[in-house]
Amino acid sequence: MSKIKDLINFQKIKEVIDIDALHDKQKMVENYVISKSMEDNLVHLLKNMQDDTHKAAQIIGNYGSGKSHLLAFIISILTEKELRKYIKNENVRESAEQLNREFVVMQKVKNYGDLLIPTP
């Protein structure tokens, strides 16, 4: 008789992501799971970031809800254009590929998060 562990293949997920220590960004972008509601939010965010007068976005969630993974995903696809082709969700990939601005990451002091700044 087969055991459940023999029938299902799970990838180990690191509980807390260290964005600065992320080595395989391509794999992270490829494996990032995008729900329908996340798809809608990402498409809206990416279209908004294309506008010269875009507003700030805020990510709110409980501990362990995926805020850091989301931020790592967004930072990766904004700062490294070649990673956009690895986004599995077609609508998010198309929105990301339409961006024609350059972005840089500026880290804030005291671990309050990262700030994405479009370059001129």
Image (cartoon, grey):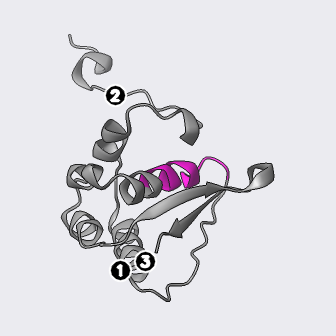
Residue 71 location in percent, x, y? 52, 55
Q: Mark 1 belongs to which amino acid?
A: Lys
Marking on residue 10? 2
Rendering coords of residue 69 (x, y %): 50, 48
- Magenta residues, as a range? 63-73
Between the C-alphas of marks 1 and 2, the distance is 34 Å
117 on left or right of 107: left
Q: Report the magenta stretch's main SS.
A: helix
What amino acid type is highlighted by mark number 3? Met
Question: Residue at label 1?
Answer: 47
Mark 2 Cα shell of 10 Å, populated few (<14), some (14-19), many (≥20): few
Which badge, 1 or 2, comes first in the chain's sequence?
A: 2
Snapshot quadrant of residue 37: bottom left
Task: Say above or below: 78 vs 100.
Answer: above
Q: Mark 3 points at which residue?
A: 49
Q: Judging from the image, what secondary structure is the residue with disc 2 in? A: loop
